[in-house]
Amino acid sequence: MNRKTIRLIIFLAVFTVIGVFSFQWFWVKKAFNLQERQFNERVHVALSNVVSEVQHLNHDSSAIYEPVKQISSNYLLASTNDTLHPYVLQNLLINEFKSRNLDTDFEYVLYDCFNDSIVFGDFVEIKTEAKDLVYEISEKDKWNQASHYFGVYFPSKELRLVDQMGIWVVSTIFLLLVVVFFSYTIWVILKQRKLSEIRTDFINNMTHELKTPISTISLSIEVLSNPNITKDPERLNNYANIIREETERLKNQVDKVLQMATLDKNKIDLNLKKVDIHKVIQKTIDGFELILNSNQGKIEHSLKANNSIVMGDEMHLTNIFFNLIDNAIKYSNKEPRIEISTTDHKYGFHIRIRDNGIGMNKEQQKHVFENFYRVPTGDRHDVKGFGIGLNYVKKMVKKHNGKIKLKSELKSGSTFRIYFQNAKNEEKEN
């Protein structure tokens, strides 16, 4: 499946999901509005009946035009001509709401025009902010100073309405689950495609890396097969050295691949002992002397950590610094300049490796420690490798209970910071 087809599928999938969600939201909102309208109508009728009951109790035969008005979505006011005891009002409201299946928590307030006061019934506990809001609305919406009225506030009206919409809530949850699983499937497809591309790139790189020394060895063997070669011992020795070097190169490449396979299965066993990181760094730098000279490069080091002894595997620690320095040289588009320094930090020390290479953007930095990932080098095609070096570095640093961080900018080089605990503190923890 090509990239264009995948993009089209994803676009159609997202369009479909948005469409389904839009319809779902439309009908859920419509159902909620219907439930709210029915609720408000029942409350309106109930409060009108309570007003009539209050007039009946007070033997008041005067008519009240539109005795109930809605102030907000969960607060209504009802006008009466007479004062009323709070507990009498409470019982009237409870009975009327129960008869109309309005089993929702409510709070009521009473306004007495004789002393111009508003009293809360404290039937249910509501937040102070809600009380202040109700009080403010009640003060603002007085019909006139010569009227009595009571208000009813529903603090959990929305939750009650949602609870009554059971089938819609369940259907929405199922729809969300479908979208989650669908999104996960798309993510897996994209990840598998990316992995496939990385593996293809890795196989191509590996083929090239293995093919070159094999071709060199084959040519050297053809030359050595010539009987006349024995008459030129120096030439014979040169070709023998070429075969030895290319064979060693092949062995190193195969070892790298096998090493990563072992790491992926977490089967690697470290030969732990006390190792001086300063000596490891110095030894690694010395090993790059010929390569640096041929590239007119230079490594400056400032090893100032007072305690550079760690519990680790010397071979793997050496490989960590070898990979970082090797990358710094390979990814430099000018004369390589590498700075290595160590400084004490709490229970261990920091190692900083800075280069003047091509650097990386933020997106590349996110993936640089992934297996088989290689930083693009633009027009340069001489950077060889499998894309497993930095993945190996991160895994080995972690296995040595260390941490590694990267800071980089395009055309400004990269800086790797590694933190290791020194041997004394690591022994204390263990």
Image: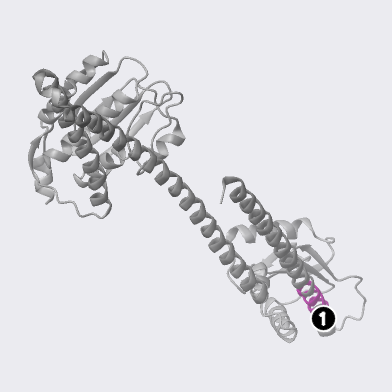
The residue depicted at 64 percent of the width and 76 percent of the height is: 166
Residue 201 position, x and y percent, is 41, 41
Q: Name the residue under label 1.
A: 49
Residue 284 relative to residue 189: left or right = left
Check the image and report above or below for 154 versus 428. below
Specify the quadrant of the image occupied by residue 413. Answer: top left
Residue 207 relative to residue 135: left or right = left
Residue 428 position, x and y percent, is 10, 48
Q: Does the magenta segment cover residue 41?
A: yes
Residue 251 in view, yes or no: yes
Residue 174 relative to residue 262: left or right = right
- Badge 1: residue crowd in 10 Å (few <14, some 14–19, many ≥20): some
Specify the quadrant of the image occupied by residue 48. Answer: bottom right
Q: Does the magenta segment cover residue 247?
A: no
Three-letter amino acid code of the residue under disc 1: Asn
Q: What stretch is highlighted in magenta?
A: 39-48
The residue depicted at 42 percent of the width and 27 percent of the height is: 377
Closer to the camera in the image, 252 or 360: 252
